[in-house]
Image (cartoon, grey):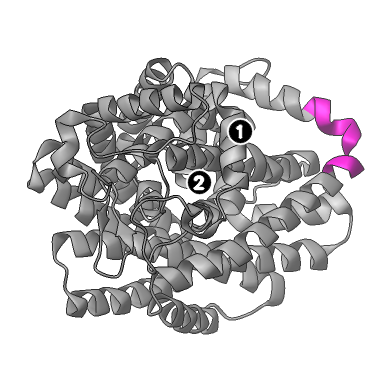
């Protein structure tokens, strides 16, 4: 059985069903928290840049702000998935893949809320005052099954530290080769050197780098999409019709095409927004906040930012241009679509996307690295092991830049599916604690309070929530 066969079975069938079922369960259980508390999400994000929130209990000099934790998770989300992943989904699954990206983002935000709230509940505090946590920590503390926690830690390290970083570096190298004719081998060396410089600086350097670079590039990219939509405004109704018709097999689309659209939309949507995957909780746990639900809501908003805003921007650029019918794929399709949409010839689209993907994908590389470091330290807190891991990440960044596109995506899809299934089982098992925290948060808000969490709030886990004051 080939890598493609294994990848197809896990991600096209097993993963699609499990993601949908879990997202629907949590949407119902939380009474649509991702919709009814949308205003609260925006309010919290607007105030999240204050130094460790000021009121956050027990924060130390090594902790990061709520916005920095949000920026690290967005840095991981916003990257290849938004530019190359969306393009691949449309090229393989048709315009209908965009519709299913939207669906999994809207429903999956509930899963993102639950996993990030759990990460905050069960986080631990280091000697330097910095918090760390994630699925490995809440599996261990919430279920007591260390083998399960270690399994997840290994899978996320393979997925993010290695597999996803090969995709990111491959996309950067491809974009610069198409935009500037820059040799892939040289780009591989540059990326490797830059990655090692950043990741040897720790989470504070990663978070500071991310909170500056990511918002600027995201805004620039969305503004470009707005310009393209304005220029091609007359074709927008047709684009929406294409997306809906393809999603449900209306017109020339057939049942097989619908299945392909659904599968590709969910796979590439998950790669981009990571809802339920178990990755963003690692960043969410680092934030110093006064209540776990605050970071859960902020991380749910990150799903919207990634998919509804940035992925949609790429989709409209491509579909307005009509270049998805020309046989292009990946980042090259996005580059050519910008050229065609603006009528600027070869240079602008290729150069702009090459620069944008350089920032998007590079911030993803350093954020992905951090997810692996957190989980390696969970298995064994060894500085020597971390140094070895950092060198290995640099090597994977190098090889990813020179490997084939099919190989890196196939590897990433397999490890992503296994990791996500492991995390979905965990949040379904422990989700009741996140729901209890949400009820406590809502009750305090109704009393006009700024919610504060205590370890005794949920008696059943009070011994395991040592990062929170008694």
Q: Which residue is mark 2?
A: 272
Q: Is residue 324 left or right of residue 406?
A: right
Q: Which tag, 2 or 1, sits closer to the chain's start?
A: 1
Q: Taking the image as drawn, is residue 18 in sight?
A: no
Q: Is residue 1 above or below residue 286?
A: above
Q: Nearer the viewer, residue 62 or 5?
A: 62
* Residue 116 placement (x, y as % from top left): 38, 41
Q: Which residue is depicted at the point 64% across and 32% down? A: 95
* Residue 247 placement (x, y as % from top left): 59, 22
Q: Is residue 323 above or below residue 178?
A: above
Q: Taking the image as drawn, is residue 410 in sight?
A: yes
Q: Name the front one of labels 2 and 1.
A: 2
* Residue 161 placement (x, y as % from top left): 34, 63
Callout 1: SS: helix
Q: Which residue is depicted at the point 8% across and 47% down? A: 147
Residue count near mark 1 (Cα–Cα under 10 Å), binned few <14, some 14–19, many ≥20: many
Q: Is residue 413 left or right of residue 259?
A: left
* Residue 393 placement (x, y as % from top left): 34, 72
- Characterize the magenta stretch by its predominant secondary structure: helix
Residue 130 falls in image quadrant: bottom left
Q: Which residue is depicted at the point 49% across and 36% down? A: 450
Image quarter hosting the N terminus: top left
Mark 2 vs mark 1, CA separation in Å: 12 Å
Residue 232 magenta-highlighted: yes
Magenta residue span: 229-238
**Dot label at residue 113:** none
Q: Are marks 2 and 1 in contact (CB under 8 Å)?
A: no
Q: Nearer the viewer, residue 111 or 132?
A: 132
Q: Nearer the viewer, residue 348 or 323?
A: 348
Callout 2: SS: helix
Q: Which residue is mark 1?
A: 98
């Amino acid at each position: 059985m080939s890598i493609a066969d294994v990848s197809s079975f896990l991600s096209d069938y097993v993963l699609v069903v499990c993601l949908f079922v879990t997202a629907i369960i949590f949407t119902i259980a939380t009474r649509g928290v991702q919709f009814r508390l949308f205003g609260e999400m925006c309010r919290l994000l607007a105030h999240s840049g204050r130094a460790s929130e000021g009121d956050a209990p027990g924060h130390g000099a090594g902790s990061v702000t709520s916005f920095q934790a949000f920026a690290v998770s967005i840095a991981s989300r916003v990257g290849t998935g938004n530019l190359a992943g969306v393009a691949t989904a449309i090229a393989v699954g048709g315009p209908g893949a965009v519709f299913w990206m939207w669906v999994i983002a809207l429903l999956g935000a509930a899963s993102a809320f639950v996993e990030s709230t759990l990460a905050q509940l069960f986080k631990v505090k280091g000697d330097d005052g910095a918090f760390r946590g994630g699925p490995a920590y809440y599996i261990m503390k919430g279920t007591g099954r260390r083998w399960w926690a270690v399994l997840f830690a290994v899978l996320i390290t393979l997925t993010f530290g290695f597999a996803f970083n090969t995709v990111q570096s491959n996309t950067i190298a491809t974009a610069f080769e198409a935009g500037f004719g820059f040799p892939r081998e040289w780009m591989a060396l540059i990326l490797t050197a830059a990655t090692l410089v950043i990741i040897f600086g720790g989470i504070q350097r990663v978070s500071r780098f991310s909170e500056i670079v990511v918002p600027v590039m995201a805004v620039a990219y969305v503004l470009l999409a707005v310009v393209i939509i304005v220029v091609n405004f007359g074709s927008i109704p047709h684009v929406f019709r294409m997306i809906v018709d393809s999603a449900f097999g209306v017109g020339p689309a057939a049942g097989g095409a619908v299945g392909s659209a659904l599968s590709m939309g969910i796979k590439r949507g998950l790669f981009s927004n990571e809802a339920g995957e178990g990755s963003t909780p690692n960043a969410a746990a680092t934030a110093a906040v006064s209540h776990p639900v605050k970071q859960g809501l902020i991380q749910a908003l990150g799903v919207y930012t990634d998919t509804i805003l940035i992925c949609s921007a790429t989709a409209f650029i491509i579909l307005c241009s009509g270049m998805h019918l020309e046989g292009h794929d990946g980042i090259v399709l996005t580059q050519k679509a910008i050229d065609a949409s603006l009528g600027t010839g070869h240079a602008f689209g290729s150069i702009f996307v090459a620069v944008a993907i350089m920032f998007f994908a590079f911030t993803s590389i350093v954020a992905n690295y951090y997810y692996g470091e957190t989980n390696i330290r969970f298995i064994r807190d060894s500085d020597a092991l971390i140094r070895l891991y950092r060198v290995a990440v640099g090597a994977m960044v190098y090889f990813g830049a020179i490997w084939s596109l099919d190989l890196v995506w196939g590897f990433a899809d397999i490890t992503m599916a296994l990791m996500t299934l492991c995390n979905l089982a965990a949040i379904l098992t422990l989700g009741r604690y996140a729901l209890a925290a949400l009820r406590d948060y809502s009750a305090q808000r109704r009393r006009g309070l700024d919610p504060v969490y205590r370890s005794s709030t949920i008696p059943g886990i009070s011994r395991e929530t040592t990062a929170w004051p008694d």
